[in-house]
Image (tube, grey):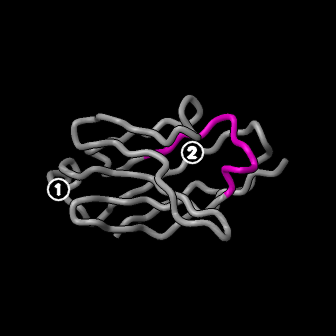
Amino acid sequence: QLQASGGGLVQAGGSLRLSCNAPRNIFSVFSTKTMAWYRQAPGKEREFVAHITNDGRVNYSDSVIGRFTISRNNSRKTVWLQMHSLKPEDTAVYYCHQTPPAIWGLGTQVTVSS
């Protein structure tokens, strides 16, 4: 139900923009959801990256503050994660998450080379 895209291989210091689309949600449903990004690096637990509430309030993990920006467009039923100044430690599979109820999208791989 959630389609994430935009991952890839980038050098340290580079940028990527991830997108998450909810094509099956109608506009009035998507606009009520809190949307979030999580990531999971190899051998590690999935961790919170950022979220944006239905009224636009945002919150970020300390590790990405100042480098990542989450945004949404309800009419397009899409949420983005703009990532700048990427570091090798940002390498992970990034997952889109919607709540309520909790729904996970398929992940998109982000690899940052040093």
Boundaries of the magenta span: 80-91
Picture quarter containing residue 40?
bottom right
- On screen, residue 103 versus residue 49, left or right, reads left
Which residue shows up at 14% across the image and 51% down it?
Answer: 28
Q: Is 6 above or below relative to 93?
A: above
Residue 85: % across, % down: 69, 35
User: Is 9 a magenta residue?
Assistant: no
Kind of residue sitting beneath label 2 = Arg
Residue lying farthest to the left in this orientation: 28
User: Is 83 a magenta residue?
Assistant: yes
Q: What element carries label 2?
A: strand
Q: Is mark 1 on a helix, strand or loop?
A: helix
Kind of residue sitting beneath label 1 = Val
Nearest to the observer: residue 66 or residue 31? 66
Give residue 13's mark.
Answer: none
Residue 31: % across, % down: 21, 47
- The residue pinned by badge 2 equals 17
Which residue shows up at 64% across the image and 63% down it?
Answer: 41
**Image mark count:** 2
Nearest to the observer: residue 32 or residue 62? 62
Q: Is 50 above or below relative to 21?
A: above
- The residue pinned by badge 1 equals 29
Nearest to the observer: residue 102 or residue 30? 102
Nearest to the observer: residue 41 or residue 104? 41
Which residue shows up at 22% across the image and 36% down it?
Answer: 55
Between disc 1 and disc 2, whose residue precedes? 2
Residue lying farthest to the top in this orientation: 66
Picture quarter containing residue 64?
top right
